[in-house]
Amino acid sequence: MQKIWIRGGRVVNADCSQVADVYVEDGKIKAVGAHLQPPSLAGVQVIDASNKLVLPGGIDPHTHLQFPFMGTQSKDDFYQGTKAAVAGGTTMIIDFAIPQKGCSLIEAYERWRSWADPKVCCDYALHVAVTWWSDKVKEEMKILAQEKGVNSFKMFMAYKGVYMVGDLELHSAFSQCKQIGAIAQVHAENGDLIAEGAKKMLSLGITGPEGHQLCRPEEVEAEATLRAITIANSVNCPLYVVHVMSKSAATVIADARRQGLAVGYFPYSFGCYWHSYQTLKVQVKGKVVYGEPIAAGLGTDGTHYWHKEWSHAAAHVMGPPLRPDPATPDFLMNLLANGDLTVTATDNCTFDICQKALGKDDFTKIPNGVNGVEDRMSVVWEKGVHSGKMDENRFVAVTSTNTAKIFNLYPRKGRIAVGSDADIVIWDPKATRTISAKTHHQAIDFNIFEGMVCHGVAVVTISRGKVVYQNGVFHVAAGDGRYVPREPFPEYVYKRIRQRDQVCQPVPVKRAPYVGKVIAVAAEG
Ligand code: URP
Ligand code: ZN
Ligand code: ZN
Ligand code: ZN
């Protein structure tokens, strides 16, 4: 284990910044303070961080590395994907174990562990998807939460016939999440409407990537988002909406967080004492819902689907699609800055052009997914901080701290503090880099952010107390990262949920029994 003394940087947490040294030993942060003096300098690597920021390593809560999907497998595997992540200043990812319908969730979890454990270059965790419903699924969710460190389950409202679940299944899954102290996640798009829309586009002769956007306009995402929020709220289950891609869906989330209404019947009478009860609309400000925009949606837009070169257009195909309204990235960033949206991810799920070509004659067969795991931190810095929309503290909140809080990793992750894991990025806010497929470390030959000049560059990345990336040079080893189990009932989320359970509990009205006549109903048959 390395001993590292980071000197003279500006240490940035979500709540404050201070100029301080950071001392790291045994994979942990041992001291933070001005002018530290390590016990001995023997074997200590000294890193000068003056004029730089010292940030908690980024946490990307949404990746799909080596994901078997749409007849192929995503190109970035757990080695290359996490290697690219650390180059960009991300030191933890949360990937998804996704069982086929009818298959075991635990087996999917074990399979993903067996793929990831030997390959990861940084720490990781797993969400597990619920793609069907049965008593066995319900039981397995409990086992995963209690014994396997999984406190988040994702349900797809799209991918009809493959992963999609209906409203009743959502209700069952959300109820079980609530019971076991997990976060429910949704891919919010109306899968029925997409399937019908796709048929229509093909019948009109639209076979190219633009059909992917045309068959799933914004309202298809917004409707599903509102439906998921409504169902989750009905069972008081915390909800996390992955890849928020449109202004409409983001607005649905913002409204729900600001105006959440819980209707309860309370045994009070007030004002009018002739009434033995009063129906109250209890204003519980804001529903417990979190929105996750991704680097792609913040950094580019869906006008590319109309690009004349098929492969360029296809490279941007992901679900929900990037939106053709060019004001979308700015809008999403504004909501992220003001707190309506909560975290940033990438949905990194890369396919090279030959894989995308599976859909050369039919856009419904183009494997869905784009890059982002390497570039998220720089894109968010450029579009968020350099633009003046958010400060360095909000940047930390949306790139690591909030994710750590929601998924119960905080303050082990997402904070520079004594006792936290030494997952640290030394960030040069003044340096720039130009994103390009020619220089990136991802497994594909295309980058959706090609040519974007970003202020904000990770100059040193430390994972588990080891320098894994420094000035363009990697010191990674496959399997150096660890699976990080997560306890259920994260306080950050469940404190509010528990309180709501108490104050929003409906109670029956106390009244004298009805003693009047009842009409006779003829017996059936
Ligand atoms: O297009 C996407 N988003 N691919 C990955 C799978 C998913 O829906 O998240
Ligand atoms: Zn999705
Ligand atoms: Zn383009
Ligand atoms: Zn995804």
Image (cartoon, grey):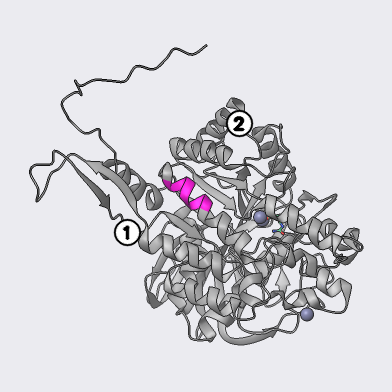
Q: Is residue 236 magenta?
A: no
Horizontal and vertical percent position of residue 383? 57, 81
Query: Which residue carries the number 2 mark?
Result: 137
Query: Which residue carries the number 1 mark?
Result: 285
- The quarter of the displayed image where residue 304 is located: bottom right
Horizontal and vertical percent position of residue 4? 54, 67
**Going 40% across and 61% down the picture, which residue do you hit?**
257
Horizontal and vertical percent position of residue 55? 50, 71
The rendered magenta stretch, by its main secondary structure, is classed as helix
Label 1 vs 2, first from the N-terminus: 2
Magenta highlight range: 227-233
- The quarter of the displayed image where residue 219 is located: bottom right
76, 212: nearer the viewer: 212
**Going 64% across and 42% down the picture, which residue do you hit?**
165
Figure quarter occupied by ligand 1: bottom right
240, 475: nearer the viewer: 240
**Going 40% across and 68% down the picture, which residue do you hit?**
32
Q: Residues within 10 Å of mark 1 (few under 14, many from 20)?
A: few
Image mark for residue 163 = none
